[in-house]
Amino acid sequence: MIYLELFWSFFQVGLFSIGGGYAAMPLIQNQVVDIHPWLTMTGFADIITIAEMTPGPIAVNSATFVGTKIAGVPGALVATAGCILPACI
């Protein structure tokens, strides 16, 4: 069930984040801190910091790191797929 929640949360982020990765940050925060209390605000800030330091799009990196934190490698794959699928469609 956690995989479906991760996928749906990041699918919504990918679908509604118009304007790039930094525009997606409030949407990701809403999903992972407010709606699903997967992370604290401090943990979210840590993940955003790491996502900014690594190469690649910040929204995709954030999805990968949140998925890893919540459900390991399968969670990272599911969250990343959910984030990039709307752009592929």
Image (cartoon, helix red, strand yellow):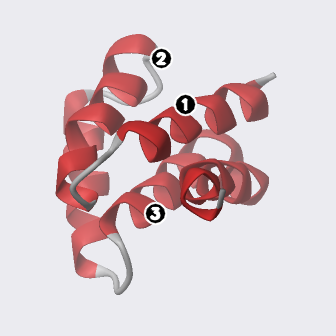
How far apart marks 2 and 3 lie (CA) works out to 19 Å
Horizontally, residue 56 falls left or right of residue 14, namely left
The correct choice, above or below, for 41 with respect to 65 in the image is above
Q: Which mark is residue 36?
A: 2
The correct choice, above or below, for 59 with respect to 18 in the image is below
Q: Secondary structure at mark 2?
A: loop
Residue at the extreme top: 35
Q: Where residue 24 sits in the image (x, y, percent)?
A: 28, 46
Q: Where residue 86 sits in the image (x, y, percent)?
A: 58, 50
Label 2 Cα neighbours within 10 Å, binned few <14 / some 14-19 / many ≥20 = few
Amino acid at circle 2: His
Q: Where residue 37 sits in the image (x, y, percent)?
A: 43, 17
Quickly name the residue at label 3: 60
- Residue 50 in which image quadrant: bottom left
In the depicted view, which residue is nearer to us: 63 or 13? 13
In the depicted view, which residue is nearer to us: 51 or 28? 28
Task: Please report the residue visible at 64 percent of the width from the left and 55 percent of the height from the top.
Answer: 85
Residue at the extreme bottom: 55
User: Which tag, 1 or 2, sits closer to the chain's start?
Assistant: 1
- Residue 27 in which image quadrant: top left
Quadrant showing the C terminus: bottom right
Amino acid at circle 1: Ser
Q: Secondary structure at mark 3?
A: helix
